[in-house]
Amino acid sequence: MQELTRDMLIKIGENPDREGLKKTPERFDEAIRFLTSGYHQDPREVLQRAIFHEEYDEMVTVKDLDFFSLCEHHILPFFGKCHVAYLPRKNIVGLSKIARVVEMYSRRLQVQERLTQEIATAIMDTLAPHGVAVVIEASHLCMVMRGVEKQNSKAVTSAMLGVFRTRQSTRMEFMELIKPTLNILR
């Protein structure tokens, strides 16, 4: 990775031996390994370590989870907020584990649509709740700093599984809970 970074610096017209760039290949190697560390983790295993049997049958919502990811098309960052809800059947999960699932999937080369679906599917498959809802609102630097250069643009994606898909009242309850957060709903 360090050799590739050094070659890239040369190809863009830089001198990789100048003082400010001498350690850039090493730093980039560390950074990209961290930013893609989600490939080496299984979110379902994390969730399974914190499942508790409770007779709780109301919606559990975790909102405003900050995330950072890399667009697989340009390897530029996209970042924003993720909101997750599930309607337990017999199991609940430690709330921090939901944040960890978001983090693990976001630390891969991604598209926002797949990221949204992967988070929802992992929770649905592992907890077997009545349903899962995920909404992500993000800014993509590939749209902000290059290409169309729309600095205030946001992309919003959702994945609704189980009762969040089939029961409008459940979906609307979730949307109402995250409403103050989402810019599009203000």
Image: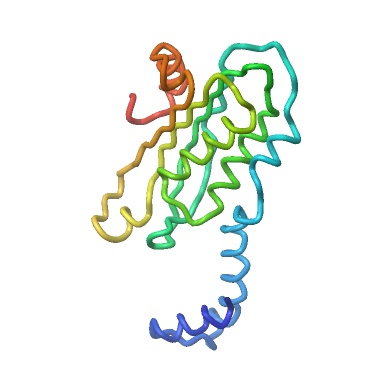
Total marks in image: 0
Residue 52 appears in which quarter of the rendering?
top right
Residue 165 at x, y = what percent? 42, 22
User: As rendered, which of 65 and 22 lies closer to the eye?
Assistant: 65
User: As rendered, which of 70 and 170 lies closer to the eye?
Assistant: 170
Q: Residue furthest left?
A: 148
| Picture colour scheme | rainbow
Residue 51 at x, y = what percent? 73, 28
Residue drawn at 68 percent across, 27 percent down: 93
Residue 88 appears in which quarter of the rendering?
top right
Residue 59 at x, y = what percent? 56, 16
Residue drawn at 72 percent across, 35 percent down: 48
Determine whether, in the image, residue 48 is placed left or right of residue 62: right
Image quadrant occupied by the C terminus = top left
Relative to 17, residue 43 above or below: above
Residue drawn at 57 percent across, 58 percent down: 36
Residue drawn at 48 percent across, 31 percent down: 134
Residue 44 appears in which quarter of the rendering?
top right
User: As rendered, which of 46 and 174 lies closer to the eye?
Assistant: 46
Determine whether, in the image, residue 24 is placed left or right of residue 139: right
Relative to 144, residue 18 above or below: below
Residue 156 at x, y = what percent? 36, 37
Image quadrant occupied by the N terminus = bottom right
